[in-house]
Amino acid sequence: MSAETASGTSADLRPGWVTRLKRVPVTLLLAWTIVFIVLAWAALPSLFTGYSGTEGVPGEQLRPPSAEHVLGTDGLGRDVYARIVYGARHSLSGAFVAVTVGLILGTLLGLIAGARGGWTDVVIMRVVDSMLAVPSLLLSLSIIVLLGFGTINVAIAVGAVAIARFARLARSEVMRVRRSEYVEAAFGSGGTFWAVLYRHVLPNSLTSVIALAALQFGSAILAISTLGFLGYGAPPPTPEWGLLIAEGRNYLSRAWWLTAAPGLVVVLVVLSADRISKALGRTAP
Amino acid sequence: MTVTPLLQVNDLAIAYKTGDHEQRVVHGVSFSVAPGEVVALVGESGSGKTTTAQATLGLLAGNGRVESGTIQLNGTDITRWSQKRLDSIRGAVVSLIPQDPGSSLNPVRTIGSQLAEVLQIHKRGDRKAIQTRVTELLERVGLTPAEMRARQYPHELSGGMKQRVLIAIAVALNPALIVADEPTSALDVTVQRRILDLIDELRRESGTAVLLVTHDLGVAADRADRLVVLQNGRIQEQGPVKDMLAAPRSAYTRRLLADAPSLGKPRPARPGIETQDFAIEVTGLTHDFPVSGGETRSFRAVDDLSFKVRRGTTHAIVGESGSGKTTAIRSVVGFIKPTGGRILIDGVDLTTLKGEKLRQFRKHIQLVYQNPFGSLDPRQTIARIVEEPLLNFEPIPAADRARKVRDMLARVGLSESFLERQPRALSGGQRQRVAIARALVLDPRVLVLDEAVSALDVTVQAQILSLLDELQKTLGLTYLFVSHDLAVVRQISDTVSVMHKGRQVDGGPIETVFGRPDSAYTRELIDAIPGRGLPVLAVPPELPPRLSP
């Protein structure tokens, strides 16, 4: 069956593929490139740098950027570029966990609220409203205080804050799809509530939710870095990006590259996620 | 022929740019409109009729371009005029009556100010003079009291009234030519007739020429002096209406004539159906909707509707928008609980069922929607859409399911190549076939069709109607057919209920209701069918087979 599909669609796609790639906006291409590089750092850091992310070289402390150390070294003689490369794994996995938590729980809550309606909707949405009412950093901090410190706990705390946003968006999308005729037709052909939800409502509401997930990925990296900077995240010497910035703060006047380099990487990744999210949102019908 | 034509279109070719390539949609179209004449551009959707009409006003969409040919207005070539230059003649010399009255007026301004706008743009007098002229125009198009109407906003008016406002705007400056793009397609038949009468009257008074764009050959035949039949961007035939209807030269015109429901013959009475038992029995169906702003107040959408349908026959419910016909059939298929009355389907009272029992019963009664674009999940393939109802009831093996889906698609005339396609790759008629296949895959006894052919072109409409007829014969189905179009109803149904403001004003066998209607309302509906009194086609056209094997 899959072979049939492939032969059926390839005829429509093939002539347009190259031209279509050419038509992708430069900024979007750049955004994807950045995301791919950072993902590669996280997957295979040793391919990108010969230095260790945690072990310093004695006598090489606080070297400015040079051919040997592209982004210089820190107070313990550790290569900053190596630390950023190794740190990608921590920051990205944290953001990934955070977005997954928010996406799954938030979409589920929004789906149930939007599809069920009535008092279920009222109860869920009032809880969501109260979550949105508390400043997100404060909420994350309170959750970390309950769960304890650590990379995963920070990720869960950031994800929990995102639940409310996902729930709101998913609910509005579900309510739009629920009113459509094909959903009524599905009930009319004998579909049970859950079957219709799974077959029609969920797939058709997901496009904007996925776009939000890409956007949230950027803000999750930012939030995790913030919490890392404040000392709630992974303990030193983990090369987490937020922690790198925090450690560099002590040398701000003497070694600007310690804060600037990881800061720039965070900014670039967040902007890329934002750009990709916009592109995903635009493909929505 | 010494008179210069008002509008002369010569060998016009128009292309739309999509992505990197240009697609030509109008190929070498030539026709002319003499002063005071009504010329109808007739064709199906995609025939290029609207594009041609837009080009005469210089209103092509941004990606459209006149490739070659000329458009002459009063002997002046306006094809290459700039938009700014065209502004000076639009409204004053040529004007437009747009297709959709619902979205053609600015919702945040009063209709008086929108009517005044066209007069201000072309500097016709001071404020006071314009005010007087606005009142005059509103009165002329039958919107009275004019002073009150001028202060109303579009949402306070019905569709027909909005169309009257648009007509008033179009005639405000006494243009020499009015382009009317499907001016009545979105309106009920009785309103349609009044609007067309109004355009006719205004035209006669001031000798304006009209270029009428329509898909309805009946409307064109009633109102136009000459017809231009378009298909796929090419002129198939043009000439005076009478000659063309009496002796159409092109096969396409013959086909359009044969498919136009208003010109068709009523369904012959079928012997033996009187002995069948009743598949649907509706008695005293009443439905109230609560009106916001009080528990006690409510609006009665359906009032004491009763009808019976024999097995294997078609019953039609006819009415204009707001007549309660949609509410009635939503009760019949069990989507809403009526306030009162009984609905017996095969002897089972649907109003007493709920929960799992109602779900199980849905197998026996299925609904086909009006809009084939909204009733199919855009993310599913055709195979999954048709298969879905089977998944909802007792499980059968995947191989059997696939076979059933293929059989059903073949039955509605779609080949197996459609199985893995998505709805957006299908035309309206093909989608409606898929919707019918989905409804029939459970072997229901009753099929409810909610305006199931209203959104389709006449030719496609005729195909779907003949498909429905064939399915009824082979499967012994009972149809409940809801429509606003009496002409279609006459072709397909055995019995009919006419609804007006929630009440049944007429009912019974089709010949009785059409021959001797009880109510004045039914008579008005019948009179409003466009294209009556036309010569019925003498030679039956040869048509290709409707269904692929």
Image (cartoon, rainbow, N blue to C red):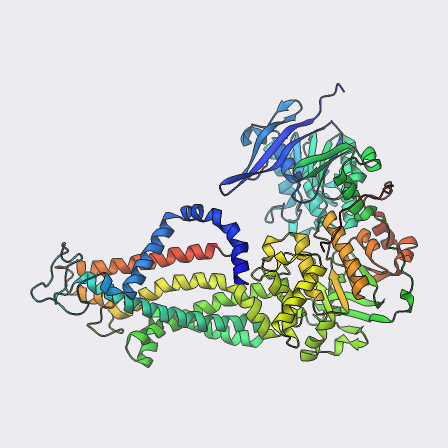
Residue at image location 52% in from the left, 64% down from the top: A205
Extreme-left residue of the structure: A59
Quarter of the figure with the N terminus of chain B: top right
Q: Where does the C terminus of chain B fall, quadrant-wise? A: bottom right
Residue A113 is left or right of residue B463, and the answer is left
In screen coordinates, is A95 left or right of B274?
Answer: left
**Left or right: B418 in relation to B237:** left
Q: Where is residue A279 drawn, in percent x and y? A: 43, 54
Closer to the camera, A155 or B270? B270
Image: B426 above or below A190: above
- How far from the left and from the top, in percent, is residue B182? 70, 43
The image shows residue A108, relative to residue B75, as above or below, that is below
Instruction: Check the image and report above or below for B226 versus B322.
Output: above
Residue B126 visible, this angle: no
**Residue A64 in the image, given as x and y percentages of width and height:** 13, 57
Can residue B74 be seen by looking at this rendering? yes
Instruction: Choose top left, top right, bottom left or bottom right for residue A147.
Output: bottom left
Count of picture labels:
0
Q: Residue A25: horizontal and vertical position, in percent?
A: 39, 48
